[in-house]
Image: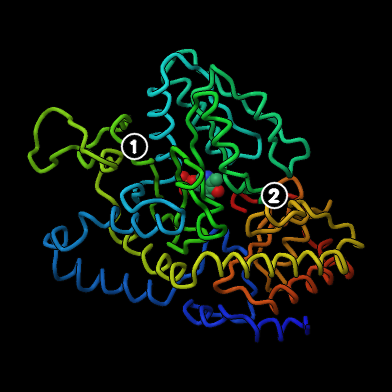
Amino acid sequence: MNTSPLSLDTQDTLARFRAEFVIDDPSLIYLDGNSLGRLPHRTRALIQDYVDHRWGQRLIRGWNEGWLELGERIGGKIARLIGAQSDEVVVAESTSTNLFKLATAALKARPGRRKIVTDDLNFPSDLYIFQGIVELLDAGHRLEIVRSPDGIHGPVEGLAAAIDEDTALVSLSHTVFKSAYTYDMAAITQMAHQAGALTLWDLSHAAGAVPVDLNGANADLAVGCSYKYLNGGPGAPAFLYVRRDLQASLRNPISGWYGQASPFDFGLAYQPADGLRRMLTGTPPVLSLAGIEPGVDLLLEAGMDRLRAKSLQQSEYLIMLHEAMLQPLGFRLNSPREAARRGSHISLGHPEGWRINRALIEQMQVLPDFRAPDNIRLGITPLYTTFDEIHQAVQRLRTVVVERLYEQYPAERPAVT
Ligand SMILES: *Cc1c(COP(=O)(O)O)cnc(C)c1O
């Protein structure tokens, strides 16, 4: 088989999807779709139509022309990407806010149990939210953060030891943000259920990147971003999932009118809506919300199985190039080597990672991102990443180190990385 990057691109059955995205500067190698996905052409046209026509001309009538159900309708499409039913997923608020709502509801649903179990690979905002809930409830809850054995792999044995009769909630990132380690969702969920605990999965780095089967794993609760692999746009609202049989028993701690049984009666007492609508709080940002749909449609058209196959092929290709060209220069693979336990980004560690990353951005036309202490994260987004880009990016990484270009950059870091 010919494994030149150009011939791999020629054989790529998903190649046509790249033309669906705005690619203003083809010489820029964008490897940060795991933080902010690219803009689909269809989204640009849709937002334009929303501004000019649906808001500009239809005005308040827009609410009866689709805006009211928009979060549920788009949630129903995201459900198909994550192995859930259409009435189990809704789009609303941010991931952090949804995590607060579902985690608080879960603790209330497990009275007498006091422990939240998570790991130290989880996204810091998730830990901050749990700490805030413990303080707010003031009911003797505590957060147990299980340590990863190596900063790369999830602490599966440590979790097994931590999950016990006192555990109300087990909450983890399905794919973790630094190393891309990906948990066996069904196995961990089963472990939690055996102890009588609920599970809450953060799918932010998994949705649209790896096949997720919430129903197959019998997962209880989940949240996730729309602006990463779903290509929903900066700050676009997040989604939340509650398994159907749990919906009636959970109470939304931010009980706003959007989750009220009959919001347009404007009654004085809160009555939760039936079904998942009770997890809503207030009026959604309609323009941002509407902008999620074309990106989700593109993923559905490509199909998660084909996306995963290309993601794995591109990841293995990148790791092979790393072993041949970067490892000898002091780079380390900071992601799992085993494909089944890896999401769709690759972290490469280097003692000079921060400055190497700056040089890539400033003079090499490569846009990855950096996560402390030493990770250069390379996001693989099969809808628009080419094999040639991966090959070029590795060559440019090599140039930065061999020619010591990174030495031109200071060691301090700005606020946003
Ligand atoms: C990106 C990300 C978030 C972001 O949460 P926001 O509320 O949108 O800021 C949360 N959790 C994980 C695991 C993430 O990767």
Picture coordinates of residue 311, whole percent (x, y): 63, 66
Q: Residue at x 50, y 26 (%)?
A: 197
Above or below 140: residue 88? below
Q: Give the left or right position of residue 372, taking residue 400 as reference.
A: left
How many other residues sit within 10 Å of disc 1, few (<14), some (14-19) or many (≥20)?
few
* Mark 1 vs 2: CB contact within 8 A: no
Q: Residue at x 73, y 81 (%)?
A: 5
Q: How is the image coloured?
A: rainbow
Disc 2, SS: loop
Which label is found at residue 245? 1
- Is tag 1's residue or tag 2's residue first in the polypeptide sequence? 2
The amino acid beneath tag 1 is Asp
Q: Nearer the viewer, mark 1 or mark 2?
A: 1
The amino acid beneath tag 2 is Ser
Q: Total of numbered circles in the picture?
A: 2
Picture coordinates of residue 319, whole percent (x, y): 78, 64
Above or below 59: residue 162? above
Mark 2 lies on residue: 179
* Residue 407 figure quarter: bottom right
Q: Give the left or right position of residue 356, taking residue 242 as reference.
A: right
Indicate the quadrant containing the N terminus: top left, top right, bottom left or bottom right. bottom right
Nearer the observer, 279 or 305: 305
Q: Give the left or right position of residue 308, taking residue 55 as reference.
A: right
Q: Give the left or right position of residue 102, taking residue 257 as reference.
A: right
Q: Residue at x 72, y 61 (%)?
A: 358
* Residue 46 figure quarter: bottom left
